[in-house]
Amino acid sequence: MRIKYLIIVMSLMPLAASAEGGEAKKSQNFVAKSLMWVKTLIDSMAVANIDRSYIEQPKLPWAVELRTSISQSYMKVSSDWPLPEGNTLKFDALSDNGFSTSVGAWVGYRGYGFGLSKELSSGSGSTLSFGAMGGSFGINLRINSYRSHQPEVSIDVDVAGEKFSDRDKVDLDDPIDVRTLFIDGYYMFNGKHFSYAAAYDQSLIQRRSAGSLVAGLMYYHSRVSYDDDSNWPMVQLMNGVGKTKLTQGSIGLGYAYNWVPARGWLVSAQAMPMLALYNRMNVYTYSLIGEDGLPFEKSENEYDEYTLVEKDVTKTNNRVTWNFDARFCVCYNWSRWYVRAYAHYNRFSYSNDDEKGRLTDWTAYASLGFRF
């Protein structure tokens, strides 16, 4: 009986192995078909509805790049103090992430890929970015963060017509913490003749000069905080404000132009004023409490040490404002190799009754690419 069962089991083993092999083969075929579908989609999106006499798609789809970049972010925070008899005192704090330089590499297919970079300079902070570009659109995401230990502080006083100004670097034990998130998207109305990708990732090549109206959407969120106890003098000068959170949603209309001065060359420029239709701000104010438990106005603290206690969070009403976005690029293409120099500039502003600020962010980089 055992021998009979053994013979039956042995006779079924090839069938089981065949079934397992069939399932594995089906799984492999599914993965291969999925990858092929994605490849076909990317290829077709890049050249859909384009005029081939203006825009060319390189035959070699893959590319690897060596990239180097420089960037800097400025955050300016201002506060006005009214004085008796119409006199004024203005306090400004300008922080930045230093002069940041990095080098890295990128690899991708038709402009879609991944990169990694390493900071080379003493600038503080980090940046995570992602971009995707099609024949008529572009999408970008950037997350920036930095900590400023030495903001530049200025005081401007106007009393009875006499003006006094002072400006100096201030060392902070606990730095100003700035974090920003950018998400922007663009649509090119003349995608048939104008290529956004030809300028910014070389997955396409502009053969003849062309321009296009550009519509853009942008989401921006920032968090600026300096609410550590050691920063109490700065908080006091900022009318008790120690942290702000800003969210803006902007829409814009601009113009972009790709100029082809000679075969292989491309000079591209884009400028877009943007209107922030959604503009909300949370302002966190603090009370200064001395070691004797009394507020700053009444405390007789001998050691000038105060504890910051959150007092209020003010949510401002929606205030329409304007921002600005600009890009510039120069590149040259050979059959396999290409070089690119690129610059990008953003400006954001905000204000409420107690405080106003402005963030300026710029990046420039150069890359050497090889198609295969």
Image (cartoon, grey):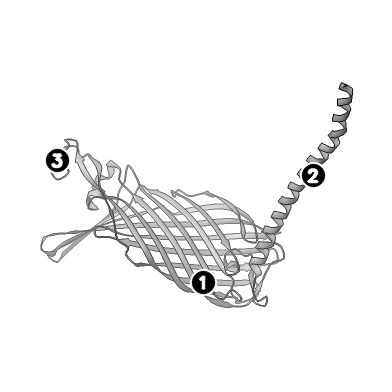
Q: Identity of the amino acid at label 2?
A: Gly
Q: Do the residues labelled 1 and 2 touch (CB within 8 Å)?
A: no
Q: Position of residue 92 (x, y in %)?
A: 27, 57
- Image quadrant holding the N terminus, namely top right
- Mark 1 Cα shell of 10 Å, populated few (<14), some (14-19), many (≥20): some
SS at circle 1: strand
Image quarter where the C terminus lies is bottom right
Left or right, residue 268 beside residue 307: right
Q: Which mark is residue 299?
A: 3
Q: In this view, does 192 lie to the left or right of 93?
A: right
Residue flagged by tag 3: what amino acid is it? Answer: Ser
The residues tagged by marks 1 and 2 sit, at their Cα atoms, a distance apart of 55 Å
Q: Which of marks 1 and 2 is nearer the N terminus?
A: 2
Viewer-side label of 3, 1: 3
Looking at the rendering, which quadrant does residue 310 occupy? top left
Question: Mark 3 or mark 1, which has the lower sequence index?
Answer: 1
User: How far across and how far down the image is residue 309, in percent?
Assistant: 25, 42
User: Residue 322: x percent and y percent?
Assistant: 37, 68
Of the numbered discs 2 and 3, the one sitting upstream in the chain is 2
Residue at 89% from the left image edge and 23% from the top image edge: 3
* Pointer 1 residue: 269
- Which residue in the protein does label 2 denote? 22
Few, some or many residues within 10 Å of mark 3 (<14, 14–19, 20+): some
